[in-house]
Image (cartoon, rainbow, N blue to C red):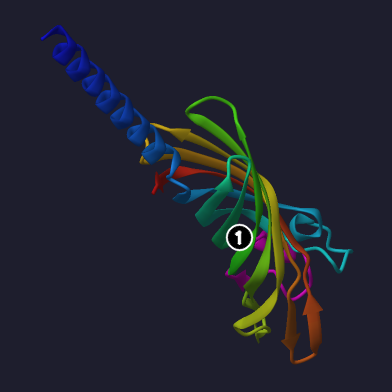
Amino acid sequence: MKKKLAIIQLLILIGLSSFSQEVSKDEVSKKFVIALTAGPSFPVGQYGLMNLNHQESGFAKFGFNLNLNFAYQLEKHFGLASSVIYAQHVLNIDELKKLPDFTNAKADHYQYWGVLLGPMATVNLSKKVLLDFKFLAGVASANAPVIQSDSGVISNEKWSDAFVYQYGTDIRYNFNPNVCFFSNIYYNHTKPVWKLVNGSVEKNMGVFDFNVGFGYNF
């Protein structure tokens, strides 16, 4: 009888151990994460330059951006990531109004969206906190602002496709195996060329994005 009880106890322990291993494997097997983040976007370099005497000045002001982030963890410290991005920045019309014939000028905004893909390196800071380093590249479509001078519209709605790249870091905090808090800091750069009636305009659009949001592990 004692031998039978010992065998039953051993089988129970084996069963509990197997169940525990299955749960652990299930948690580890969640290699995909998708997250939606949003936040402020700050123009830098020529894009944010406010110099009327510099033809490369973008006069772009503080804006906002949205990121749909997707990642696949190939192994513990390496994976593939992709992003669908959108950003919008108001044109600083107050500076342009200092020019002749622009005292009553009006303008809308810059905007662009893009799709990017690239490698991702991951560092596990703790059991719940992960730090990702990314470098992504892809294609963006950028929209030039429509400007109306005192004499009328001088630029029409223009879109242009261009190469875009992004690099930065993500911090993921896993509330549980499925839901995570997602925060990222990215630098984005694209250089569209818009063809206008009087020639072409090339614009260096560099921004820093600071985002927060939530993700889902699966």
Compare residues 197 and 205 and report the one nearer the observer: 205
* Residue positioned 81% across, 63% down in the render: 57
Query: Left or right: 201 with respect to 168?
Result: right
Instruction: Say above or below: 2 vs 70.
Output: above
The image shows residue 13 at horizontal and vertical percentages of: 27, 19
Query: Left or right: 212 with respect to 1?
Result: right
What is the three-letter code of the residue carrying label 1? His
Compare residues 151 and 200 and report the one nearer the observer: 200
* Residue pointed to by mark 1: 89
Task: Name the quarter where the N terminus is drawn.
Answer: top left
Instruction: Say above or below: 198 vs 166.
Output: below
Q: Residues within 10 Å of mark 1 (few under 14, many from 20)?
A: many
The image shows residue 202 at horizontal and vertical percentages of: 80, 75
**Stretch of the chain drawn in magenta:** 88-108
Instruction: Say above or below: 11 vs 134.
Output: above
Residue 36 magenta: no
Query: To which quarter of the image does residue 176 belong?
Result: top left
